[in-house]
Amino acid sequence: MSSEPPAPNERPTLLIVDDEEGPRQSLNVLFKGTYNILLADSGPAALAAAEGRKIDVAVLDIRMDGMTGTELLGKLKARDPLLEVIMLTAYETMDTAKEAIRGGACDYLTKPFEISVVRDAIGNAVARRRLADRLSGSSLRLIELQHELNDISLREELARTQNEIYESVMHDIGSPLTAISVLIQILNQDLASTRGAADPKRVHTQLQKVDQQVGRCIALSRRYLDYARQRASGQNEVMVNQSLRDVYELVAANPAARGNTVEITPMQVDLKAAINGTDLIQILINLVVNALQSTPQPHHVKLSADYLVSPLTEDELGGGSDEVVIGGDRFINEAPLVVVHVEDDGDGMSPEIMAKIFAPYFSTKAPGKGTGLGLVIVARLLGNAHGLLRVNSAVGTGTRFSLYIPVVLS
């Protein structure tokens, strides 16, 4: 049985199955104000009650006449693998506990149960179910995306521009996939070190981060699908401070951040920038990761934003000997403007290097360590938003990238 992720305010549904009236009604009274309750006094009655319904958590008595709780567990899990199941028994043995866990139960409680214990167990099970629904929803979105990629007409369009699009996709998706890999390694280490008894809150937080990264992979892929179809990639405005916080969260999991420090200074008054949110995050991630990789020595990277009430001057648009300006032909130089700075105190660049950094496939990194596409993507995405990019650098003093983007006035 497939299930859609629940709405945030939707009540979870709790199935309580026990052939004894006392425990069944006790749980009903305890939880009827919090959950939608389904009651059943046997395995067949439970299957009938669950038919056509989405059950979030089931509480099953192990010893019941006819169909045991363990048998019912298997049948319910076959219908909905995401179902969270808690087993109850008055006859606790190691064998029954092992059998329940092998069958997919998430918890195992003994009668008579303590109210606080069973309340916590069901609350944790509901939280796990909601998270599982979210991750399942991400998987469904990935499957839908795969179907779109297999569409014949889209493949023909991709074939016409495949070099640029495929290479850009591989470059952009590499960052969130790296974060996903790191997060999964952390989870595996937690589970291995605790023999499966890791802190549920910590695991929950890490899984949420994995889900966020999956969503970002989907968003990046859809942007390139939209690009292939020559259509807009969605809502072209985003709150600047939220983007800064998102980028800080994303780069924290990147291996390039190890040993270095990253600082963000948000705007005092948050504003909307006239750029697609995914595009701005991708631009800033590319620039921050480049800044983190600017020297092998420990160094500092700062991400900040400000508000300009006047257009840029001719001198600021022209550039100098230690400066490169990109996007001037498409830039809408009308106040107000948002300016976002990415600065580092790394090795800096010579004028000869700066003259080449926006050329496709040019990279100062060791072979196999860079694609030479990061700044090409930055320039293209910022140009699509009618923004401007200024780069200031000097050998031994570091580098500063400054993005100028129109403001959305509302």
Image: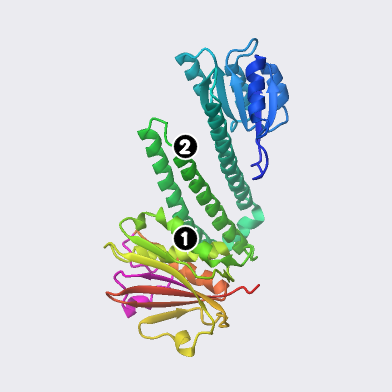
What stretch of residues is rendered in magenta?
340-367
Residue 75 is situated, as x and y percent measured from the top left of the image, at 63, 22
Residue 378 lies left or right of residue 238; in this view the side is left
- On the image, the x and y values in percent for residue 402 come to 45, 75
Could you tell which of marks 2 and 1 lies nearer the N-terminus? 2
Q: Amino acid at mark 2?
A: Pro
Q: Which mark is residue 9?
A: none
Q: Residue 286 in the image: x percent, y percent? A: 44, 64
In the rendering, which numbered label is found on residue 200?
Answer: 2
Classify residue 406 as left or right of residue 187.
Answer: right
Q: Residues under labels 2 and 1: Cα distance?
A: 26 Å
Task: Find residue 17 and report its image quarter.
Answer: top right
Residue under the image location 35 percent in, 59 percent down: 369
Q: Please determine whether, in this image, residue 400 is positioned above or below residue 18.
A: below
Give the residue at mark 1. Answer: 247
- Depth order, front residue of 371/61: 61
Q: Nearer the viewer, residue 92 or 377?
A: 92
Task: Tell me the SS state at disc 2.
Answer: helix
Q: Amino acid at mark 1?
A: Val
Q: Indicate left or right for 310 with 150 as reference.
A: left
Q: Does residue 316 sit above or below 136 in this rendering?
A: below
Q: Is residue 20 magenta?
A: no
Q: Quadrant of the C terminus?
A: bottom right
Neighbour tally class for label 2: few under 14, some 14-19, many 20 plus, Cα within 10 Å = few
Of residues 257 and 239, the one nearer the viewer is 239
Secondary-structure class at tag 1: helix
User: In which quadrant of the rendered view does residue 358 lie?
Assistant: bottom left
Q: Is residue 361 visible?
A: no
Q: Dot 1 surroundings within 10 Å: few (below 14), some, or many (20 or more)?
A: many
Q: Examine the residues drawn in magenta and state their main secondary structure.
A: loop
